[in-house]
Amino acid sequence: MEDQGTGTPGPQRGGPPWRRGAGGPPDWRDGPHGWSGGPPWWRGGPPWWARSGDEAGSRLPWRSTLPVTVFVLVGSNAAAQLQEGERASLGLFGRVLLLLGSGLLLWRQRYPVLVAFGTAAAAMLYLGAGYPYGPVFFTVALGCFSAIVTGHRKAAWAAVGMLWVGHVLVAHWLYPWLPPSGDDGAPWGTEVPVAAWIIAIVAVSELVRVRREQWARERAERAQAARRRADEERLRIARELHDVLAHSISVINVQAGVGLALLDSDPEQARTALTTIKAASKEALGEVRQVLDTLRTRGDAPRAPAPGLGRLPELVEQAAGAGLTVQVEGEAPPLPPGADLAAFRIVQEALTNVVRHSGSRHARVRLERAAGALRLRIDDDGPATGADAGGSGNGLAGMRERAAALGGTIEAGPRDDGGFRVLAVLPLEPGGSHEVKEDR
């Protein structure tokens, strides 16, 4: 008797049907050609693996099921001719079972568990009726494969186990009462290749399931990384625009007030205020244009160099135009471009906050190198002119984000003797981390 699950020959039968043209394991090894995309699984998998359950179940997979059905029917007819006289003739009921097993595959994406058990049950009935061995078991392999790759592992294993138990019962105990008449029992040694084929089917299905889960995780990680990069870029642009516009508009606002106040009494001073407004607005437009250029020319370097502490004298001059006297102490050491830009923006935002929120018209900027880091200290003598002493929440948050991105720290708050202080520590080497030790 032959192995009904794989076509392994029994002791009194010929070779397996597919070796004589009926089809079988070679297709299990290479994969059915009706699958969308087809093997190899490790190069990306068929498109329907990546679909969600709703999308995959929105229509029946006719194009992949029809070739499988033709293959099963044609292969079974060929097997019946090759095994004529050894197995029962393939009658109407046998063909109905073949069509039933293949037709169930139409619902393998919607109801994978039911399809796995349905194809196994159809194969058991086919086996018990004594019909010729052939590709009927191919439908069981596809049904269990679909169940495993969609996450129903235990159900697929149970269906395969049910079919194997049915094979054992028919091959070793029930064969005297089942067709064909005069059939002999199979030796127990034939169960080894049966188990090997079952293990191979389950192993391949599990491999595909694991690979599918890996692809899903990789897609999710890529999407999350893209969202994170987009958020970081959005925050960076927001910080740049805030720092550029807040400083320049503060200068313009102060000078506009001066010009309006002195327009009649001191036209010359009003003219000076308007000149300052023009210069500040021109610089703001230039920096905003630079930020926008970096957005329009993706991947290209900006056309103008980013500002750094080398432009600190210009910043002091702009602050003077807004009525703020700035005293600079110390010199900045050579800085990496990112740290240089962050230091400039921190000083710019701190001076802007003094202009907008402090009653003091004098500020001090101190730069010093200590323990491999640049220490920036910006002080004013106050008092605060409103509830937003020291600056708005966005400005202080932007300074902290710039410092944190470089591994540095910032501390901002009122001084014990009055006024307000911003103390920043920026590492001179990438990846450094330094704590703020505030001078009182």
Image (cartoon, helix red, strand yellow):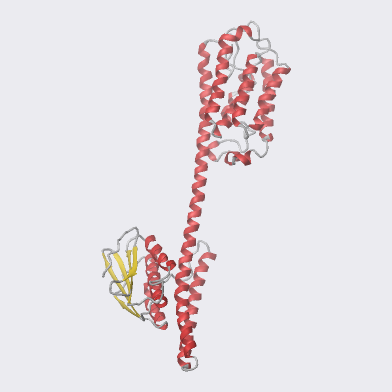
Residue 247 visible, this orientation: yes
**Residue 191: x %, y % from top left:** 52, 15
The number of numbered badges drawn on the structure is 0
Splitting the image into 4 quarters, where does residue 89 fall?
top right
Residue 11 visible, this orientation: no
**Residue 353: x %, y % from top left:** 40, 74
Image: 38 above or below 134: below
Splitting the image into 4 quarters, where does residue 26 fall?
top right
Viewer-side residue, 23 vs 255: 255
Image: 164 above or below 216: above
- Residue lying farthest to the right in this orientation: 92
Residue at the spot x=51%, y=21% of the render?
Answer: 196
- Residue lying farthest to the top in this orientation: 182
- Residue lying farthest to the front in this orientation: 387
Splitting the image into 4 quarters, where does residue 180 fall?
top right
For the N terminus, give its image quadrant. top right
For the C terminus, give its image quadrant. bottom left
On the rendered structure, is 120 left or right of 342? right
**Residue 224: x %, y % from top left:** 49, 50
Viewer-side residue, 340 vs 164: 164
On the rendered structure, is 74 left or right of 211? right
Image: 132 above or below 277: above
Viewer-side residue, 302 vs 274: 274
Residue at the spot x=51%, y=37% of the render?
Answer: 211
